[in-house]
Image (cartoon, rainbow, N blue to C red):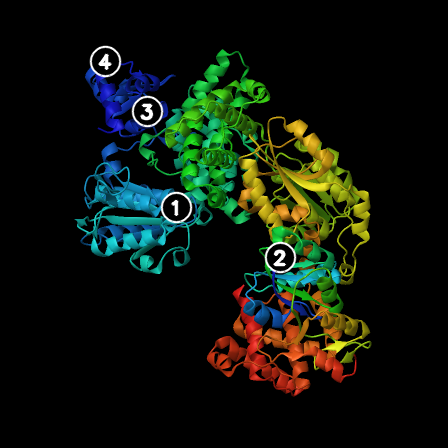
Amino acid sequence: MTRREKILQYLQSHSGTASTGLTTNEIAQALDILRSNVSKELNNLVRQQLVYKLKGRPVHYLPVTATKAVANTTMADHPQLEQAPTIGFAGQAKINSFPTTEYDNRNVFDKMVGSHASLKSQVEQAKAALLYPPHGLNTLIIGPTGSGKTYFANTMYRFARAEGLIKDQEFATFNCADYAHNPQLLMSHLFGYVKGAFTGADEDKPGLIEQAAGGILFLDEVHRLPPEGQEMIFYFMDHGTYNRLGETAKTHHADVRLICATTENPESALLQTFVRRIPILIQLPPFNQRTPKEKLQLLEQLLTLEANRIHKNIRLNEDVVQALLGSVTYGNVGQLKSNIQLVCAQGFLNSIQDENEIILKFEQLPTNIKDGLSNLAGNREELGKLTRLLEPTMLIKPDAQRDVPQIDSYELPYNLYEVIGDKAALLKDEGLDQATINNFIMTDINLHLKSFYHQGQFNKAEDRLNEIVDQEIIDLTKQIQHFLRQQQYPVRENFIYAMSLHISSFIKRVQAGKPLREVSANLISLVHDYPAELKMAGQVKELIGKHYHIPIPESEVYYLAVLLASLQLAPKTGKVGIVVAAHGKSTATSMSQVVSQLLSVNNIAAFDMPLEMSPKSALLGIAQQVKKVDQGNGVLLLVDMGSLSTFSEKLTDMTNIQVKTIDMVTTAMVLEAARKTALIDSDLQTVSHELQEFDGYSRTPSGYENKPSVTETANETATDQRHKAIVAICSTGQGTAQKIKNMLDKLLIDNLIEDVSVIPISIVNMKERLKQIQQEYQIIATTGVTKPDIAAPFISLESLLQGGSEAFINMIDQLSGEDQSALMMLEDSPQVAEQLAEKYLGQYFTFINPAKIIKVLDSYCDFVERRQQLTLKNSFKLSLIMHLAGAIERCLTHSQMHVEQKQIAKLQNNQLFQIITQANDILRETLNLSLTAAETYYIYQLIDTEIQK
Amino acid sequence: MPMDIRLLRIDSRLLHGQVTTNWAKVTKVSRILVVSDEAAHNAIRRTLMFQAAPPGIKVNVMPVAKMLSIYCDPRFDFFRVLILVERPRDAQRLIAGGLKVSKVNIGALSFDSSRVMVTDTIAVNQEDVLAFKWMHQHGIQLDVRKVSGDNSKDLWKYLKDKKLI
C-alpha cells in the first residue's frame, strides 16, 4: 500500500461521523509519517478530489466519501467547504466553471499554455511520437533550465494515458544527475539487480525499466548519464531486452517508451550513437521567446497554484505583474515559479489576518523582483503588447482544476504556507510584534527559496567539490541538509561545502585510527552559547553514525555544533557593487562593458549622462543602478567629474545603501575596482580606500615598459618585512582548514608564488591565534567556514571551489591587474598592436624595413583570416607578423628552416596549408620573394597551434 | 632532485614561433619559464608571452633572482621546464647561481650597432662573448639550432673563426 493509500484509508476510517475532519499533525502522528510528507500527500489527494479541505486553521481534511455519507449535499451547499476554485480578473462578475470530467479527459495538451501558439509544433511532434504505431517513438526534449521540460514530459504521459496508449500506471521518472558519479548504482536503479549481485543485494529487485513496462520512462538531465549508461540505454532501445545487474544474459523484455530531457546541446553533450536512436527531438523555447499572452497565462497558472495552496484569493496590481514577468532572466518558467512562490509567501505573511485574500504590493517586493519592472521597461515593444493585455488589477482565485502536476524540481518538498502559518502563530504566542515576526520569517522564506537561484552554478561547484570529497559524503551531506531543513533549521548555501569537508576529514581520521580530538574547556564554553546548534549537532552525529555504522564520539558533537554556529554567523558574501557614471552618450556603458567582459563579473552597472541631462534626473538614474548592483555590501560609485562627485550622501539617503564615490574614473580604474571586488569578500571601505591610492596602470604603451622597481622598492620599504600568510579557518583547524591549505599550497606553487604561507587554524580561540599569527606574519587574506574580524579580504569556501581560485591568485599577484589592462589595450586597439609590431620588427630584425613591410604583413594576416574564416587576436597577429618577418629575413640570407619532406607531404591536402601557400603569393607579388615549403610548414604550425587553443 | 630542465635557450625574442611550434613540443615540457628582468617588469611583453603559450603549457615570466630562488626550493622539484633567456649574460647568471645544465641552446641574438654577426641569426657584443667564454670554460656545450631538427653547430667554433676569442 502506498503512503497515499495509507493516509486515505486512515482518513476514511477515523474521520468518524462528524464533518470535522483531521489535521495534518494528527495523521502524521498516528501513522508515524513525516508531517511534510503527509501534507504533500493530502494535497495530492485534494487534487484528485478524494479528500476535501475544510476552511480555517489548522486545516482539517475530510475524505470525500465521508462528506457524501454525512451530508449528501453538493459542495455549494456545504458552506464549510472551500469554494469551487476559479480564475478571473477583478470586476468580472461570472466565474467560469468547467465540468470536471470533460475538462480532465479532453486533449490534455489543450490546457498547456501556448499549445496553439509558440508550442504548436512541439505539441504536434509529441503527439506524433506517442501515436506512432505500434509502440511510439523515443523522444528527446531540449530546452534551457526551467523552460518546462518536466512539465512537457508529464503532459505527454497524461496524453498517452487519456488516449489509452499506455497501461494504467504511474509516470516513471529518473534524474540521471542523481547517480551521475556512480554508473553501477545507476544501472541497478534502471535495470534492477539479482540477489547476490553485490554486497547488500539481499534479494532480487526490479529496476525502473521493469516498473515502467508498458508505460513511459522519463530520463531527466540525460546528458549526465555517463557514456556506459548511454550505451546500456541504447542497447535497450534497439532490442527491448536487458539484464538485471548480476545476470549474464539479456533475458528480460519490456516495452517502454522513453522520453529524455536535457538542457545541453545534444550534439556535444550526448553520444552520437545515442542521439541517432532518438527520432523525435523537441525543442522548447526559452521564456523570453514566448508571446506576451502566453507569459501572462503562465503567470496566472502559477499564481493559481499558489492560490490553491493558500486557499485565498490573490490580488495584484499591474506593476506587480510586470515586475514578476520582468524578473525572469536565465531561469525561464522555473524562475518565474520560484519568484511567484517568494512573493506569495511574503504576501501571505503580510495579509495573514485577512481570511479571504492576500494582496501583493509592489513596494513590498524584494529588490531583485522590483528590478523586473525596469528590465521589462527596457523592451518597449514587449511592454506595449503586455500592457494592452493587462487590467489594472488582477484577481486570482483558487482553482483545483487548473492545477498542474507538481513533480518538478522547483517545487518545495513541503507546504511553505503551513510552515509560515504555524511559525507565525508560534512567534505571536511568544509575544513578538508583527513587524519582528515578519522580518524573522521572511529571512527564512528567502533561505528556502534561494536554492533555485543557485542551482545552475551549484552543480558546477559541486563537481569541483567532488574532486576533493567522495561523492558518498556529498550525498550524505545533502541528506543532512535536507534533514536540517525539515527541522526548520536554516541552512545556508555554504553548508554543503563546509559540512562535507568536515565529515570527510573526520571519517579519514577514524579510518586511519588516529586518536580522537579532545574537547577543551574553551570549546565547551563556546558551544554553550549555541543550544540550538548543539541540539542539531547531536542529531547530525546520529545521522553520520547511522550511515557509516560506527559509533561517533561525543566530542564530535561539539565540533559539529561549532561548525553549525559558525555557518550561521558567516556574513553575506555579497560583493561590493560598482556603478560607473560618466558624461557622454555611452562613455560609462562602454567602460563597464569592456571590464565585465574581460573579467566576466556581474556586479557592475553603468549610467550614461548626455550633457543635456539635469543633475536631478542623473541622481535618480544613478540611484536605480545603485539598487540594481547592491548585494548588501555597499556600492562604489566611479564618476568622471563635476556634480557627480557630491552624490554619495544623497544616494545613501535615497537608497539606504552605503555609497562611496571616487572621482576621475578611467577604464583601468573600473578594471581595478572589478578585480578588487570580484569574488572576494572585501568591504566597501577597504576597496574605496585602496582605489583612491590607485594611480592607474600607465596609459601609453611605452609607459608599460621599463616601469620597474620604483613602485616595488617603495612598497618594500613602506610595507612591513613580515612574511605573508593566508589563514584558513575551520572548526578544528585540522580538517577542512588543512584541506584548504593543501589546495591553496598547490595553487600557489602552480602560480610560482613562493613567499606566501597558508596557516590552518581552529575557530576555538580564533581571535587569540590570529593575534599571535599577526605578530609574525602579515595576513593578506582569510578563508574558511567563518569570516574573522580582521582587516583582510575574506574568500568564502564556495567561491574558492567555484573557480574563485583564479580571482584568488589575481588578488595575491599584484601584477595581474597590469597584465589584464595591457591585454585589453592590445586587443582593443589595432593602433597599439601595429605600433608594437613596428617597434619589435626594428628591434629584432636586421635587414628589413619595419615601416615598409608592416602593411604587406598585415594584408597577409587579413588574407588568412578571411579565407580561413577566423578572427585572430591582435596579440597573435603580432606573433605571426614577427614570424613572417623572420621567414623573409631567412629567405634573404638563404638560411631557410628545414623540415622533413614527409611532414610537408602530409599537409598537401590540408585546407589551411593551401590557404597559407596562396597567401605566400602576396609576398611574391610585392617583395618578389618565394617562401620555401618548409617555411610554409612552420607558418602553418604556428597558426594551427593558435587555432587549437 | 632539483627541477627537470629540459632546455635552456638563449633567444632575443624569448617565446616565439620556433619555440611554440617546435621546442615546446619535442621537449615535452609542462611549463615554459621566461627569465628576464626586463620582461618581468614589462606588462606588454609579459602579456605577449602568456598569449603565445602553446595549448596545455603554462608560461611564467620572472626575473633572474626569482628563477634561482624557486630552483633551490624543493616544492618546485616536480616541474619539467623549458627556460628562455634573452641574453647570454642571463644564462651565465643562472648557471653561476646553481642551475645544472650541460648545454645551452642558442636560437637568435638580434643585431644592433654594438654587435657583429657571427652566423645568419646570431650577433654578439663584448659582454656576450665574455658570457659565452665563461660558459665554455665551465664545460657547457654551446649548441646552435633554430629548431630541434637542425644540425647542431658549435658556437665556440664560430666565435673562434671570427677571432672573437
CA gap, disc 2 to disc 3? 66 Å
| Label 2 in the same subunit as label 1 | no
Give the number of the disc on residue A16: 4
Chain assignment, label 1: A
Mark 4, secondary structure of its residue:
loop
Look at discs 4 and 1 and give the one toward the viewer: 1
A363 vs A215: above or below? above
Q: Residue at x 64, y 86 (%)?
A: A929
Amino acid marked by disc 3: Val
For mark 3, what is the residue? A38
Q: Secondary structure at mark 2?
A: loop
Q: In the rendered structure, which amino acid carries the disc numbered 4?
A: Gly
Image location of residue A734, percent across then percent down? 55, 34
Tag 3: Cα neighbours inside 10 Å, few (<14), some, or many (≥20)? many
| Chain of the residue displaying label 4 | A
Q: Earlier in the sequence, mark 4 or mark 3?
A: 4
Crowd around label 4: few <14 · some 14–19 · many ≥20 (10 Å): some
- Is A886 on the left-hand or right-hand side of A105? right
Q: Is residue A189 left or right of residue B148?
A: left
**Displayed quadrant of residue B141:** bottom right
Residue in the image at 48% along x and 31% along y: A342
Question: CA–CA distance between discs 4 and 3?
Answer: 19 Å
Mark 2 → mark 1, Cα distance in angstroms: 38 Å
- What residue is pinned by disc 1? A181
Q: Tag 2: residue type?
A: Pro
How far, Cα to Cα, is label 2 from label 4? 85 Å
Q: Position of residue A917 (x, y in %)?
A: 55, 81
Whether residue A414 is situated above or below residue A948 in the rendered picture: above
Q: Which residue is mark 2?
A: B2
